[in-house]
Amino acid sequence: MADTGNNRLYGLQMLRFFAAFSVLLGHVMHEALSFAFGGTESPAIFAQNNFGAGVDVFFVISGFIMFYISDGKFGQPGAQRAFLTRRLIRLVPLYWLFTFLMLLATVVLPAQLAHSQLNLGHVLASFLFIPWPDSTGLAHPVLGLGWTLNYEMFFYVVFSLALLLPQRLGLLAITGFFVGLTLINALVGPTQTQIAFWTDPIILEFLLGIGLAMLAKSRLQLSTPIAVLLLVTGIAGIAFAPMLGLGGPYSRFIVAGIPASLIVAAAVFGLRETPRGIGKALVLGGDASYLSHPFSINVVVLAWAKLHLGSAWLFIATAVVCAIAGAVVLHFAIERPLLGWLNARFTQRPGDAVRSTREVARPRGVEPLSAP
């Protein structure tokens, strides 16, 4: 039997692929509806999906990974620096690259983009991971899907500060801080963009991931039937819980965050063997960054309009395949070499205070993103 610790990370990598696929499918369906591909025959599912819950899965995974790779390192000299260095290397270069490309696309092809108005404050905030309202009033950066990375950077900073403390105290501080932030969310006005963003109860999903990582460190394992039950319950929750019509700031945490944690638990505690065959392909899909997806989708949109094609389902299938293939190609051509060089240049060798995710699972690889 393969090493259980490694398999937990393999399971999360495969789950990352499915979470990214869910978000991708939601984006592609939105584009099909926006450009009226299929006309009146467009599938009704366009307006009735919760595919964005893949983001919630990513946030739970993020909390899990950060604690899992840092357990026992709290309060140790150099732990905070090592953690932040690896996280920044993994997040910043690719995000800045694709943000720059989106700025270029905004200038060259403004009619192709939903939000083509630029202002200096929004652009600077996008590069600095600060939530800032776009032209529609949403707290989305220039690269729209980067709003999740604004949360990731927030998680990184808070978690790195907790690493300065003994582990028990650090975890209590993170928990108290995040819970306290969500309690003031209802008092925040609509014009207080940054405070409203950072106090959104979605941040509690990060704590769910930490909790699962603590259970994983206790060597908890589940039988296959129990793991399957958790998986099915989580998927059903994401699919049907929104029908309950819950309102208030905690509604997303309840209808998506909690089911997402069940799905992550199934992947973490249910996987027994090292993935082979299609499992390896899924791990690769989880490794590849999703940041190129909007560009691949827009290329397909342009081609569809140019060729006057109308099949909505064919558009969806084509855009999804192109986005995944493009991400994998860029993973090998740009992402992996760039991050490998940066890690070799700016981080210590194996045995650092904080090791990367893929170093734990596969010593010669490059650690994955924690979120979409």
Image (cartoon, rainbow, N blue to C red):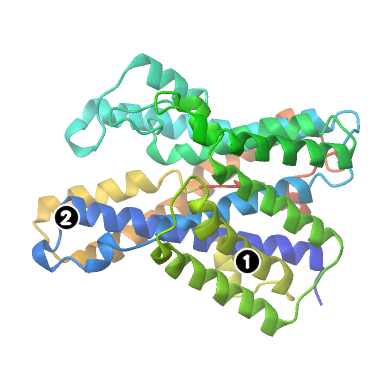
Residue lying at 51% horizontally and 31% vertically, measured from the top left: 187
The quarter of the picture where the N terminus appears is bottom right
Q: Amino acid at mark 2?
A: Trp
Is residue 130 visible to the viewer in this orientation of the structure? no
- Specify whether residue 137 is in view: yes
State if disc 1 and disc 2 touch (CB < 8 Å): no
Q: Which residue appears at 49% of the width and 53% of the height? A: 251
- Residue 268, image quadrant: bottom right
Residue 329, horizontal then vertical, whole percent: 46, 52
Q: Residues within 10 Å of mark 2 (few under 14, many from 20)?
A: some
In the displayed structure, 242 sits above or below 27; it is below
Give the SS element for disc 1. helix
The three-letter amino acid code for the residue at tag 1 is Leu
* C-alpha separation, residue under disc 2 versus residue under disc 1: 38 Å
Mark 1 is surrounded, within 10 Å at the Cα level, by few (under 14), some (14 to 19) or many (20 or more) other residues, namely many
Pick whichever, 345 or 289, lies toward us.
289
Q: Which residue is mark 2?
A: 304
The vertical placement of 361 against 291, above or below, is below
- Is 8 on the left or on the right of 200, as rendered? right
* Residue 116 location (% of width, % of height): 24, 29
Location of residue 266 in the rendering, given as x and y in whole percent from the top left corner: 66, 70
Q: Residue furthest bottom?
A: 225
Q: Secondary structure at mark 2?
A: helix
Left or right: residue 18 versus residue 163 is left
> From the viewer's perspective, is the residue at label 2 or at label 1 nearer?
1
| Percent x, y of residue 126 | 45, 26
Q: Is residue 203 left or right of residue 330?
A: right
Residue at the extreme front: 187
Q: Which residue is mark 1?
A: 262
- Which mark is first along the chain, 1 or 2? 1
